Image (cartoon, rainbow, N blue to C red):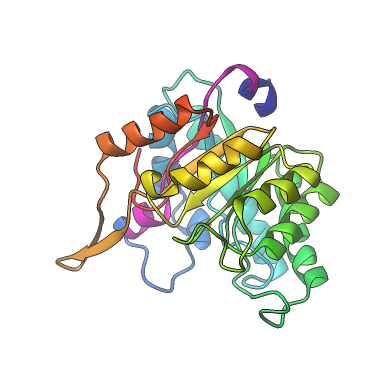
Amino acid sequence: MNILEYLKDNILYMDGGMGTLLQAEGLQPGEHPERWNMSHPEVIIKLQKAYFDAGTNMINTNTFGANSLKFEDEELEEIIKAAIANARAAAESSTGKQQKFVALDIGPTGRLLKPYGDFDFEEAVAVFAKTVRLGVKYGVDLIFIETMNDSYETKAALLAAKENSDLPVFVSNAYSEDGKLMTGASPAAMVALLEGMGADAIGVNCSLGPKALAPIVEQYLEKASVPVMLKPNAGLPRDVDGKTVFDVLPEEFSEEVLALVKKGVRVVGGCCGTTP
């Protein structure tokens, strides 16, 4: 059963935070977490297995920043190959009996596209395409484009995914407190853009907690004809004795997400600060 067939009759559970868990495991500031796929595969497998054991259906590969702007071609291929192998190993070793899927995780390039920056749209498409082709080569079940706060970069990533694979593509954007993307697009505009380009599920992730994201999610539910996703942070981060903690506890988080599931959200998980 592919993920779209599963989604017809089920709520799909995504995983939670990865970066915050890797920091707790010793990832240093400025260190590329994607390299841990090769240097610390046992840590990646342990964390992803914990999500599968907790009931997750869909794990994101540890490839959020894996692109050709950060890594040479040979290393990029090693990273993506290892990341997918780690996620598959986590699925196979998990005690969970639920359906399990592995998503190629694609985050922003870190460069601003014109006219806000100096990065060409075609160049961005080429960067994303390289990552997509490697994900297809090593056997992911779907592509998950996430934490995009620029509508133009989102378009570049989705175009690359559609032109270089036949896999389902989920797309999630990160909204500011004003309810718009950093570059100004509204939820309604993003629904129209992403559905028009053939995204299979769309939604919001990161930036804020579930309560703060609720008004944006409700706009998606009003406009979208494809499944809507929600992957919020555990609220806002703060520093306590040199340690980053988040202000939404599990019970409150789950209640607020459940309220949005009851309104029609079909795909749910967590972002920064959430755990298995």
Q: Which residues are magenta?
A: 8-23
Q: Nearer the viewer, residue 222 or 114?
A: 222
Q: Is residue 131 visible?
A: yes
Residue at 55% over, 27% down? 100
Q: Is residue 18 above or below residue 141?
A: below
Which of the two residues, 181 or 254, is positioned nearer the viewer here? 181
Q: Residue 207: percent from the left, percent from the top? A: 44, 57
- From the viewer's perspective, tell me whether residue 28 is left or right of residue 79: left
Where residue 99 appears, x then y in whole percent?
Answer: 55, 22
Estimate the x, y position of residue 143 in percent, counting from the top left: 67, 44
List x then y, in percent, for residue 202.
Answer: 63, 42
Identity of the residue furthest to the left in this view? 241
Q: Quadrant of the N terminus?
A: top right
Residue 142 vertical placement versus 240 (above, below): above
Residue for point 50% across, 36% down: 14
Direction from residue 258 to residue 247 in the image, left or right: left
Q: Quadrant of the C terminus?
A: top left
Q: Is residue 19 magenta?
A: yes
